[in-house]
Amino acid sequence: MALEIASDMPVGDPKHTVRATRTAGRKMRSLLLDAASRLFRERGLSGVSIADIAAVADAFPSQITYYFRTKEALFVEAACRDMLYLARAAEAAALQARTPRDYTRALVETVTSTDSVAFFAEALTLTRRRQDLAPLVERTIDRLHAEGLRAYANKIDRHGWRSLREPDTTSRRFWAVAIGVMVEGYAMGRSSDALCAEMLRVLDEQVSPSDDAARLRRVDEVGASAATKSDREA
């Protein structure tokens, strides 16, 4: 396919040819990931073949092996991409929150409204047996934590919120709770509303009970006695 695209480009413009070929490659990868995500989420890894994905993406099976090598690698990359898309959507949903409680609720409602976290959890399990795929999962988790920290720290600085934990710990804890609650909930057939309620229950202790009543300061800006009290509350 890349050779056919290249042959349509002006011979005297090799840089343009390379850019066009790369653009076509990115588009094809995206189409394959879209198709794979849909099918894997509907049927699971074992219920989907490379031929199935190629048919939905209007591609050739050889293109899947060219871009992703194996079905398992495509599964993991699709799950990781969906997880990052979900994190972006959750951040956008929480953008207008005025209190820590509203911020947490917006995040939780977005995260529990889809099965992206459960899909990602399946990828985590797969990498236990396929350590060659672990780096992609690791990069995704690092990205989740970094983006979550940035978003939460910006909210703290903007509104003067106080958290019982440092922003980095809060961000990491959020995704750890999300994965745990979603895996358990899906295994037990819980509804999205039940998953949302459970996540809110577990995460409720990270915000001050009085956050709606007064402007709050960060834990690291208060005195040692206040920090000690917060530790006891946690």
Image (cartoon, rainbow, N blue to C red):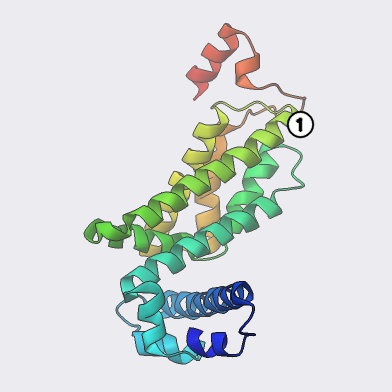
Residue most toward the front?
12
* Residue placed under numbered mark 1 in the picture: 159
Q: Is residue 200 above or below residue 2?
A: above
Residue most toward the left?
129
Q: State left or right for residue 216 relative to residue 139.
A: right
Give the residue drawn at x 72%, y 23%.
216
Q: Position of residue 116 (x, y in %)?
A: 49, 64
Give the residue drawn at x 53%, y 39%.
171
Q: Position of residue 107 (x, y in %)?
A: 62, 50
Give the residue drawn at x 22%, y 60%.
129
| Residue 61 visible to an observer of this rendering | yes
In front here: 10 or 99?
Answer: 10
Q: Amino acid at mark 1?
A: His
| Residue 1 visible to an observer of this rendering | no
Give the residue drawn at x 64%, y 85%.
10
Local SS, label 1: helix
The picture quadrant where one finds residue 111 is: bottom right
